[in-house]
Image: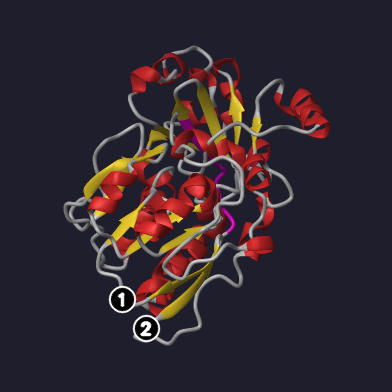
C-alpha cells in the first residue's frame, strides 16, 4: 500500500458521485478520505478503540465513526470543526495536564522526553518544535527518515511502518508519549495507551495545522506552534501579494503504484495552494482528497503549472509511461516548460509546517521568482 500521506483506501462512492464521474471525469475515481489509505496506510479498521491506562478514556460520542472519516462521509469535510475542542487548558509548564483528542482524554504526567511518532505528519510536527523522537514508523515507499528532516530528527529507532506497527519495538523504547491518528491506528489505541500516554488526531492530511497545535499540547509548546503557523501564513500571503491578479492555475499530480492522482482541496497540498491562494483546475475544485485519472486521461491535469511527485520507486508507477507518452507532450504546461518534478516527501508526505514551508519555497521559485 502506498502511504498517501493524506490517506489510505478508496472511497465508497454514492450514486450521485458516480454520475459526476461519468459526466465530468469519464471514469476517473474521486477519492474521499478513504483515498487517504494508500499512501499512509491504515493500521486500524473500524470499531471503538477503547483506550486504557495512563489516564486515558474513550471518546464515546465525541469521536466520529472511523468508516465515515475514511470514506468521505459527512465527517470528511468537518474534521476541523470537530477538532475545535481538542488540546489542553493547562498553562505552559504545568503538569500533569489533560489532552483532549480523537479518542477521548489522556493525562500527561510530566513533560515528555521520549516520544514515538506513528506518521509523517507527527514526525514533522515534533521535529519542527525542536524535539527528536526516539521512535518513528516509515512509509512503505521508504525505510529512511525524510531527507528534509534528517539533520534535525536525530537517530530514532524504527518501530514498523504506517501500515504495520511493531508494538513490541515501541514498548522496548519505553516512550512517555505516543502521537498518531485515529484514522491510522484506532484498533491499536488500547494497546498503545497501555505502553504510554497516547494522543490521536482524527486524521492526517488537510487538518495539519490543527494537528500541529494538538501535538504541541503535551509539551506545552502551543505558543511556539502558533508562531510557526503565523510565519507560514505570512509567507504564503506574501507570495500571493507578489502575484497580484496574475495567479496561475496549479495541478499537484502524483504517480503512485497502480494509480495517478490529481490532489484536490481537502489535501495537505490543497490547503497550501489555498493559503497563497493559487487556483486549481475545475476538476480539482472538489471537497475531496484527490481525483484519480488513468494515463489516457492525464490531459485533465493540464494547468498553467503541473508539479508532479512520485511515491516510492518510479518503476513501480506509470510515471515513465505517462511522461514519455504522446498525450503528455500535448499539455500546455509541458509545452511551456512549466511541468516540473517536486519532492514527494514535502509536497505529499510531509503534512507539517516544515514541509509546508518547503512547498512555499518551491512555489516562490517557480511561479513568483524574484519575490
- The label on residue 199 is none
Q: Could you tell me if residue 179 is visible in this image? A: no
- The label on residue 95 is 2
- Judged from the image, the secondary structure of the residue bearing numbered disc 1 is loop
Instruction: Please determine whether, in this image, residue 307 is positioned above or below residue 215.
Output: above
Answer with left or right where residue 360 lies relative to residue 278: left
Residue found at x 69% / y 52% = 75
- The span picked out in magenta is 245-254
Q: Position of residue 153 (x, y in %)?
A: 22, 56
- Judged from the image, the secondary structure of the residue bearing numbered disc 2 is loop
Residue contact at pointers 2 and 1, CB within 8 angstroms: yes
Answer with left or right where residue 351 lies relative to residue 246: left
- Quadrant location of the N terminus in the rendered image: top left
Q: Could you tell me if residue 209 is visible in this image? A: yes
Instruction: Quote the CA–CA distance across marks 2 and 1.
Output: 7 Å
- Give the residue number, with chain letter if any, for mark 1: 111
Q: Is residue 247 magenta?
A: yes
Q: Nearer the viewer, residue 50 or 343?
A: 50
Instruction: Please determine whether, in this image, residue 108 is positioned above or below residue 337.
Output: below
Instruction: Please determine whether, in this image, residue 79 is positioned above or below residue 45.
Output: below
Q: Position of residue 61 (x, y in %)?
A: 69, 62
Amino acid at each position: 500500500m502506498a502511504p498517501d500521506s493524506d490517506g489510505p483506501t478508496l472511497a465508497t462512492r454514492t450514486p450521485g458521485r458516480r454520475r459526476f464521474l461519468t459526466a465530468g471525469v469519464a471514469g476517473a475515481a474521486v477519492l474521499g478520505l478513504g483515498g487517504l489509505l494508500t499512501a499512509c496506510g491504515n493500521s486500524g479498521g473500524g470499531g471503538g478503540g477503547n483506550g486504557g491506562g495512563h489516564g486515558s478514556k474513550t471518546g464515546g460520542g465525541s469521536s466520529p465513526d472511523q468508516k465515515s472519516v475514511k470514506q468521505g462521509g459527512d465527517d470528511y469535510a468537518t474534521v476541523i470543526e470537530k477538532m475545535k475542542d481538542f488540546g489542553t487548558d493547562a498553562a505552559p509548564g504545568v503538569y500533569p495536564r489533560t489532552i483532549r483528542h480523537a479518542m477521548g482524554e489522556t493525562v500527561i504526567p510530566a513533560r515528555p522526553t521520549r516520544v514515538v511518532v506513528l506518521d509523517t505528519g507527527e514526525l514533522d510536527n515534533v521535529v519542527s518544535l525542536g524535539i527528536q523522537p526516539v521512535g518513528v514508523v516509515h512509509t512503505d515507499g521508504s525505510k529512511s527518515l525524510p531527507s528534509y528532516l534528517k539533520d534535525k530528527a536525530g537517530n530514532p529507532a524504527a518501530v514498523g511502518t504506517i501500515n504495520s506497527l511493531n508494538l513490541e519495538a515501541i514498548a522496548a523504547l519505553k516512550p512517555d508519549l505516543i502521537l498518531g491518528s485515529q484514522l491510522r491506528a484506532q484498533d491499536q489505541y488500547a494497546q498503545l495507551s497501555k505502553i504510554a500516554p497516547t494522543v490521536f488526531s482524527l486524521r492526517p492530511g488537510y487538518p495539519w495545522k490543527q494537528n500541529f497545535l494538538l501535538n504541541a499540547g503535551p509539551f506545552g509548546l502551543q505558543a511556539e506552534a502558533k508562531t510557526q503557523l503565523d510565519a507560514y501564513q505570512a509567507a504564503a500571503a506574501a507570495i500571493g501579494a507578489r502575484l497580484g491578479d496574475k495567479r496561475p492555475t496549479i495541478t499537484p499530480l502524483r504517480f503512485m503504484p497502480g494509480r495517478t492522482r490529481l490532489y484536490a482541496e481537502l489535501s495537505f497540498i490543497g490547503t497550501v495552494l489555498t493559503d497563497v491562494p493559487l487556483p486549481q483546475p475545475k476538476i480539482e475544485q472538489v471537497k475531496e482528497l484527490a481525483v484519480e485519472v488513468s494515463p489516457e486521461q492525464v490531459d485533465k491535469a493540464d494547468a498553467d503549472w503541473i508539479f508532479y511527485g512520485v511515491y516510492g520507486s518510479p518503476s513501480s508507477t506509470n510515471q515513465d509511461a505517462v511522461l514519455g507518452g504522446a498525450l503528455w507532450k500535448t499539455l500546455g504546461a509541458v509545452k511551456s516548460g512549466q511541468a516540473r518534478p517536486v519532492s514527494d516527501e514535502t509536497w505529499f508526505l510531509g503534512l507539517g509546517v516544515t514541509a509546508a514551508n518547503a512547498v512555499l519555497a518551491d512555489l516562490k521559485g517557480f511561479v513568483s521568482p524574484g519575490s
